[in-house]
């Protein structure tokens, strides 16, 4: 079992670092070029959300293994303001940043699974995964 | 980090070959507009052949810079968007409307000359 990679997100350069790590891991797992781009882009969006809305937080990258299949799991967690209405942020076109991010529906479409756990005042944790074909 | 902007006759040529962080792409936006003013360039080609990921922020800044160049009276073309980048942009929900694009630098230049003559 590979150790999870943890990247602390405190500034915009950490966003780049997180997506570089994501690309390394997805290359190692032999994801195709398009999936590598999907994974890297999803990490970039989640890391930017942390930076924009919470100021700081963590991206954790883990390797998944299930029934001989391999995958990548990324979780983005912060202790920021949390999300009031999760259903609303999962709607296409919803934005509180004036269009800086494509939002969570886009991230969801890039990945195979998407889970969100958030409470107002108690931070946000988003976990996404993609399986190698 | 600064992205080099080359001048060739009436055109400015940019080939993005670095990993784009937010600051680099914002600095590029300003540098390009200043270079247009200083050189009086009529057209700009921004080549993305070496770019393997465009997230929503980079897409927004690139889209904005193209609108800004047109506000200044200059035509801009994006070239060399990779298949993986095109796929992820659309899945993310980003459509770069009203942006001229071409397969590669060469076709970008010929689109520019058509735009400027036509």
Image (cartoon, coloured by chain):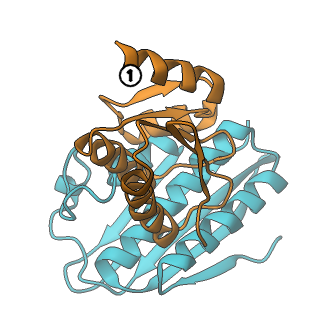
Chain colours: A cyan, B orange
In the image, residue A82 above or below residue B63 = below
- Pointer 1 local density, CA inside 10 Å: few below 14, some 14–19, many at least 20: few
**Quadrant location of the C terminus of chain A in the rendered image:** top right
Element under disc 1: helix
Can residue A126 be seen by looking at this rendering?
no
In the image, residue A24 above or below residue B39 = below
In the image, residue A78 above or below residue A129 = below
* Image coords of residue B97 (percent x, y): 31, 30
Q: Residue at x 24, y 77 (%)?
A: A119
* Image coords of residue A7 (percent x, y): 61, 81
* Image coords of residue A113 (percent x, y): 50, 48
Q: Residue at x 30, y 84 (%)?
A: A80
Q: Quadrant of residue A124?
A: bottom left
In the image, residue A21 above or below residue B91 = below
**Quadrant location of the N terminus of chain A in the rendered image:** bottom right
Question: How many callouts does the rendering have?
Answer: 1
Q: Residue at x 37, y 69 (%)?
A: A49
Asked whether A40 or A124 is in front, the reply is: A40
B115 with respect to A35 (left or right): left
Q: Chain of mark 1?
A: B
Q: Quadrant of residue B100?
A: top left
Instruction: Name the residue tied to disc 1.
Output: B116
Asked whether B91 or B63 is in front, the reply is: B63
Can residue A19 be seen by looking at this rendering?
yes
Q: Residue at x 39, y 78 (%)?
A: A51
Asked whether A100 or B24 is in front, the reply is: B24
* Image coords of residue B70 (percent x, y): 28, 39
């Amino acid at each position: 079992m590979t150790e999870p990679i943890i990247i602390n997100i405190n500034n915009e350069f950490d966003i780049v670092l997180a997506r570089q790590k994501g690309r390394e891991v997805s290359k190692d797992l032999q994801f195709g070029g398009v999936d590598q781009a999907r994974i890297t882009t999803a990490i970039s969006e989640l890391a930017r959300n942390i930076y924009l809305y919470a100021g700081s937080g963590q991206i954790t990258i883990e390797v998944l293994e299930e029934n001989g299949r391999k995958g990548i799991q990324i979780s983005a967690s912060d202790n920021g303001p949390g999300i009031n209405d999760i259903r609303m942020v999962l709607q296409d076109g919803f934005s509180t940043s004036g269009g800086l991010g494509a939002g969570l529906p886009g991230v969801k479409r890039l990945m195979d699974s998407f889970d969100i756990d958030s409470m107002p005042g108690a931070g946000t944790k988003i976990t996404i995964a993609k399986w190698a074909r | 980090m600064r992205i080099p902007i080359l001048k060739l006759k009436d055109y400015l040529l940019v080939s993005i070959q670095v990993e784009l962080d937010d600051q680099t792409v914002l600095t590029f936006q300003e540098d390009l507009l200043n270079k247009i003013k200083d050189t009086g360039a009529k057209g700009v080609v921004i080549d993305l052949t070496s770019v393997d990921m465009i997230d929503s922020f980079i897409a927004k800044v690139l889209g904005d810079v193209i609108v800004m160049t047109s506000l200044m009276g200059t035509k801009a073309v994006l070239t060399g968007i990779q298949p993986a980048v095109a796929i992820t942009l659309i899945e993310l929900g980003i459509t770069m409307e009203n942006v001229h694009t071409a397969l590669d630098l060469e076709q970008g230049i010929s689109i520019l000359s058509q735009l400027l003559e036509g």
